[in-house]
Image (tube, helix red, strand yellow):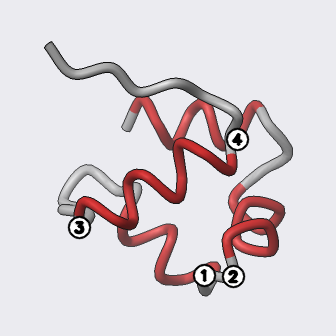
């Protein structure tokens, strides 16, 4: 849900779909409360949003 809020703040899901090459409907499902994105999808979204991901 938090990543969806960030996506909305950065131009919306449609804009993010264009930047990642992913389908808009697929992104809505991925970023929903029941969404369970694969690792490569999560990394693609983080990069497209200009965020950093740190694991520790």
Q: Position of residue 47 (x, y in %)?
A: 61, 45
Q: Picture coordinates of residue 32 (x, y %)?
A: 35, 56
Question: Could you classify mark 2 by the number of other residues whose Cα lies within 10 Å: few (under 14), some (14-19), or many (20 or more)?
Answer: few
Give how far across and how far down residue 55 sits, in percent.
21, 21
Q: Badge 3: how crowded within 10 Å, few (<14), some, or many (20+)?
A: few
Q: Is residue 24 left or right of residue 40?
A: right
> Which residue is the site of mark 3?
38
Q: Residue at x 25, y 50 (%)?
A: 33
Q: Is residue 31 above or below residue 10?
A: below
Q: Rounded to the nearest whole Å, what is the CA distance between mark 3 and mark 1?
A: 13 Å
Q: Earlier in the sequence, mark 4 or mark 2?
A: 4
Residue 49 placement, left or right of 42: right
Q: On the image, numbered disc 1 is attached to which residue?
A: 22
Point out which mark residue 35 bears. none
Tell me the quadrant of the picture where the N terminus can be found: top left
- For label 3, the SS is loop
């Amino acid at each position: 849900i938090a990543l969806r809020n960030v996506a909305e703040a950065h131009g919306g899901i449609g804009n993010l779909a264009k930047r990642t090459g992913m389908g808009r409907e697929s992104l809505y499902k991925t970023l929903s409360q029941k969404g369970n994105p694969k690792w490569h999808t999560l990394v693609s979204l983080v990069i497209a949003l200009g965020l950093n991901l740190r694991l520790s």
